[in-house]
Amino acid sequence: MNAQIVLRTGLPSFIVTLAFLFILRGLTLVGLKWASGGATQLRGVKDVVGDGMAAALFSGSVGQDVFRWLAARGVIDSFPSGLPKVAGIPVVILWFAGLALVATWLLVRTRFGNWIFAVGGDARAARNSGVPVERVKTILFIGTACCATLVAILTVLDAGSTDARRGFQKEFEAIIAAVIGGCLLTGGYGSAIGAFFGSIIFGMVLIGLTYTSVDQDWYLVFLGGMLLVAVVFNNMIRKRATGER
């Protein structure tokens, strides 16, 4: 639906997706309150999922035996009970790295990746060159929706419950991470690996704040500052990429 609105009206993708973010967020709040008698949370998700394939694919950690073996030999830190302080590699990390590798291969090694850059740089020129612009944009919107769904599944199974208010302001964090990674807001330039490292940098700084004595209410100040720095950095990359002075 977002893709068709963008293609038929010519509105910026950012505005359309942001509008539908608020629409769907509001519908989720209203619907969940109606279904749960006024609450914005739905508990017991882990009990329903149990220990099935979904739990193994989207939650927990892998390599637990290896980490216990390393802890027993003093290679990694362990608790007094002998259990390792790090139980294993979270599944979400594997999804994160795997999708970054697949996206990088798609952008760098395939014809469809060339089409993505062409459409992002100049849709009219791409269309004149024979690139199916409408199809490319539609596939990208669908792919983005699937990635958002994957993040929701991972988050819900990790927490064991849903919360309609969970994820507020994450849209800005996603923008900041991508821009820090070198992606142009205007499109046509960037890389999945850049966004990968941009999100790691942003996440390390964000999590690092929780281990300091800084008041956590400064988080919004930090978020706004990072957004401003990211936009300035983005503008510098755009000028370098386009040769603009």
Image (cartoon, rainbow, N blue to C red):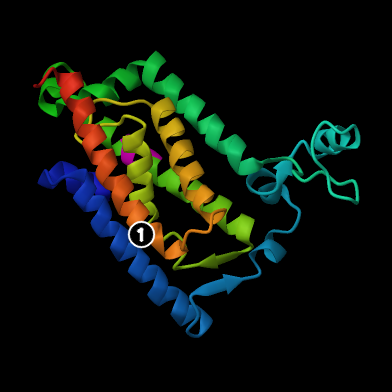
Q: Say which residue appears at 27% left-offset and 41% top-offset.
A: 229
Q: Nearer the viewer, residue 172 or 80?
A: 80
Farthest bottom residue? 37
Point out the stretch of residues depicted in magenta: 139-143
Q: Mark 1, residues whose alpha carbon is within 10 Å: few (<14), some, or many (≥20)?
A: few
Q: Say which residue appears at 39% left-offset and 76% top-offset.
A: 30
Q: Say which residue appears at 16% left-offset and 24% top-offset.
A: 239
- Is residue 204 rendered to the left or right of residue 75? left
- Is residue 24 rendered to the left or right of residue 118? right
Disc 1, SS: helix
Q: Nearer the viewer, residue 244 or 154?
A: 244
* Snapshot quadrant of residue 238: top left
Q: Nearer the viewer, residue 65 or 161?
A: 65
Q: In the displayed structure, would residue 237 be above or below residue 142? A: above
Q: In the displayed structure, would residue 144 be above or below residue 242? A: below
Quadrant for the C terminus in the image: top left
- Majority secondary structure in the magenta region: helix
Q: Say which residue appears at 41% left-offset and 69% top-offset.
A: 28
Farthest front residue? 213
* Snapshot quadrant of residue 165: bottom left
- Residue 177, image x, y percentages: 38, 40
- What's the amino acid at mark 1? Leu
Does the magenta segment cover residue 142?
Answer: yes
Q: Is residue 134 visible?
A: no
- Is residue 53 rendered to the left or right of residue 232? right
- Residue 50, image x, y percentages: 74, 59
Does the magenta segment cover residue 60?
Answer: no
Q: Is residue 145 visible?
A: yes
Q: In the displayed structure, would residue 29 be above or below residue 145? A: below
Residue that numbered label 1 is attached to: 220
